[in-house]
Image (cartoon, grey):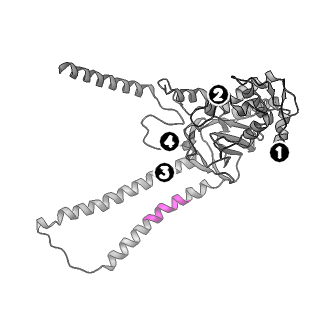
Amino acid sequence: MKSIYTKLVSLGLMAVATMACMAHAASDLPGGPAVNQLNLHPAVTRIAHEQHFLHWMMLTICIVIFIGVFGAMFYSICKHRKSRGAKAANFHESVTVEVVWTIVPFIIVILMALPATKVLVAQKDTTNADLTVKVTGYQWKWGYDYINGDGEGLSFISTLDSSHRAMSDSGNVSQAPNDYLLKVDNPLVVPVNKKVRIITTANDVIHSFMVPSFGIKQDAIPGFVRDTWFRAEKTGDYYGQCAELCGKEHAYMPIHVKVLSSKDYKAWVEAEMKKLAAKQDDPSKVWTLSDLVARGEKIYAANCAACHQASGKGAGAIKPLDGSALVQGAPAEMMHVVLEGRANGAMPAWKQLNDTELAAVVTFTKNHWTNQTGQVVQPAQFVAARAGKYPEAAAQ
């Protein structure tokens, strides 16, 4: 009996020690979630500060009303109970009481509504923006297009860091960093103290763009555009997530906004513009098989491996690409699937990639793992495919 008791105590101590280690392993993420966080995220915009004020004001009013109402109720129950000889009063309605308990709540509601309405109107005032960014929700990543302002013309896809996804798939998160499942390959970069207008839409299902530190949350709806705005008052990294249940990969759709000083932002824009010019793809260029495969491998890792796996074996309902008849067959059908999607969005459309990127990833899958088809799909063939013509690929 003593031995069993000793073992149970040991197991309990081990569990406590493990929990303690886990607790010590985690720490606050600046601009993101904090350990044992109970309150709203620290605000870095004027709107977020106003939301915090409203939150505490409403809570205080509700607590005062709660204490007042229930205090009077419990006092009355205790003071005037039958066991103390209290007798029920016999009276008719009082006009004074009726007027008071109608007017007082009305005044309270007005006092609550005025500041709330002011903040709500300010939240929707997206005029005179210094920078406009179109944010498109995809299953399951974000697309950022700089429409107006410094950086106009820049466009990129933001995807969860592949190492974090691999860590999640393995189930071993003992060494997870503080930004676990929040790290992306391409964060949204904006300047400090500038009004940034966010235009939201979606490519497939409803998503929601939310960054708590900015006090913004705007649904992204297919076929519609919505907008919101923020003006970050501090430089740094700020995190959010898709706040609308959008499918099985919903948890892997983080938002990372990097706020830079004006000088650093201009330097970032210049560097990105140079990269854009260097990466500008000529769809008429004829690529070799090896060059397309090398580029396609990177595109596959960033966009396709989350579902189809790095091994190409698929998972669950996701069909494998390794050994697939679709991949090993004529290019036309696979090109159509990549461009238009399939199964009501279960396989999303990838029209947002340019023709060279699409040609590269298709050529990669056709010449990787056991799919040694020798087929090459050129960018020009995707130019034709977007027009509804699906030419056959030449074999090398």
Q: Nearer the viewer, residue 219 or 294?
A: 294
336 to 124, vertically: above or below = above
- The kind of residue on which mark 4 rests is His
Q: Is residue 115 magenta?
A: yes
Query: Residue drawn 69% across and 37% down?
Result: 157
Magenta-drawn segment: 108-117
Q: CA distance from mark 2 to mark 1?
A: 28 Å
Q: Where's the C terminus, which quadrant?
A: top right
How dense is the environment of label 2, judged by Cα within 10 Å: few (below 14), some, or many (20 and up)? many
First of labels 2, 3 by sequence position: 3
- The kind of residue on which mark 1 rests is Gly
User: Which x, y percent locates residue 203?
Assistant: 68, 46
Q: Nearer the viewer, residue 143 or 80?
A: 143
How dense is the environment of label 1, judged by Cα within 10 Å: few (below 14), some, or many (20 and up)? few
Q: CA distance from mark 2 to mark 4?
A: 40 Å
Query: Residue drawn 26% across and 81% down?
Result: 92
Q: CA distance from mark 3 to mark 1?
A: 55 Å
Disc ID at residue 388:
1
First of labels 2, 4 by sequence position: 4
How dense is the environment of label 4, judged by Cα within 10 Å: few (below 14), some, or many (20 and up)? some
Q: Which residue is mark 2?
A: 312
Q: Where's the N terminus, which quadrant?
A: top left
